[in-house]
Amino acid sequence: MSEPVATNQTILVVGGGISGMTAALEAAECGKQVILVEKSPSVGGRVSQLYKYFPKMCFPTCGLEINLRRLKANRNIRLLTMAEVTRLEGEPGNYTATVRIRPRYVNENCTACGACAEAVEAEFDDEFHFGLKKRKGAYLPFTMAYPQRYVLDPRILGTEDAERAKAACKYGAIDLDMQERTVELKVGAVVWATGWRPYDAARIQPYGYDRFKNVITSVELERIMDPNGPTGGRLVRPSDGKEAKNIAFIQCAGSRDRNHLKHCSRICCMASLKQATYLREKFGDEGKATIYYIDIRAIDRIEDFYARVKADPNVSFIKSKVASITEDHATGDVILHGVDTEGYHRYSNRHDLCVLAIGMEPSVPADQFPTELVVDENGFIQRDPANGAIFAAGCSEDALDVNRAVQSGTAAALKAIQVVNRVAGTEG
């Protein structure tokens, strides 16, 4: 199949999460040619890993389904997955992007029947579930993955598993000879939407994330709650599979801390308020949540959601920066130690499970951009004329919730459209 032919009136969108998909769709539906580049095997980004959105507590599969339907129907978008921009040069209206495309080892004949996965024996940590479960060496990234095509893990190449996968496929979709390739794209403007990654909780040593099995992160809890997740949707703790009915949530885990992330990650308070409702969903009156916080930051309409959660007698709030966590080795319970700054008394509180409301940082560190961009001290791309026609969207620009990430994607698309419209006007 031929490579996409891009003119300098084409818009390049880097990143296929919610903001990147939004930017690509908005531009394409305005009649612009768009190339959407995604590093992973499928689009969807962090939103695809959520169990529910706040404040309406609906499932993200709905929003994803709508966007995927729009994406499939729009001929103005060319999607490149397993692709990464390694170099970006030029000026507004005339950029050259060098893109490296990793082999999937599965071609477009794939029907997603799953026969290759059934034939393969090797298993690896599942990245989509943050390593909480295993996946086969031939796999579909997640249920709603698009493109709906399997992927072969390169670690099985040259093994009997690879040959078994190839033999199992009735459609000739397994291509073990696929090679990495590099393409150059000519574009007029760029939307940079590479999103965010969870801060490494193991770096917060007093909380024992890397030592205590029953200390997990907020993003891991989202996967645990999902019916397609590592526990089949059962809210249980990793150590022994016991139902986690008494859960502690620690706010600002890695955020607002000069030793970690200096900035407020904005979504963390809302994420914990949302997740506190999961206990009611699973256990009714038996579920109890305790939120340890510095201050609760809930803004706009979300203040109402905070008020509803706060009114729940089974949700407690303790104003405190937890000092440390220890473990009861006999039971696996975690014990949080600190000082309640409202009552000024020390506590050592026992919980079934502790969830760290982990901070957000840009997925691409500032020193790894393929071109020079103006960033702030936290690595987020700034709105600066020096960036030319490279416009940040979503969490490349700031720590944002889903709603604001979508708005940011739309705004970036409009800016990119203005640039290519000027190009068209000049050429005309």
Image: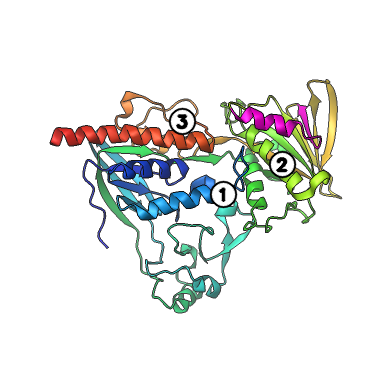
Mark 3 residue crowding within 10 angstroms, few (<14) / some (14–19) / many (20+) = many
Residue 261 percent across, percent down from the top left: 57, 30
Residue 356 percent across, percent down from the top left: 68, 39
Relative to 102, say whether 335 is above or below.
above
Mark 2 residue crowding within 10 angstroms, few (<14) / some (14–19) / many (20+) = some
Q: Is residue 55 magenta?
A: no
Q: Residue furthest left?
A: 428
Towards the viewer: 315 or 331: 315
Q: CA distance from mark 2 to mark 1?
A: 18 Å
Split into 4 quadrants, where in the image is the C terminus? top left
For disc 1, the marked residue is 49
Whichever of labels 3 and 1 marks the residue nearer the N terminus, that label is: 1
Residue at (31% x, 46% y) in the render: 34
For disc 2, the marked residue is 277
Residue 380 circle label: 3
Rendered image quadrant of residue 422: top left
Which stretch is magenta?
A: 301-319
Residue 193 visible in the shown view: yes
Residue 75 circle label: none
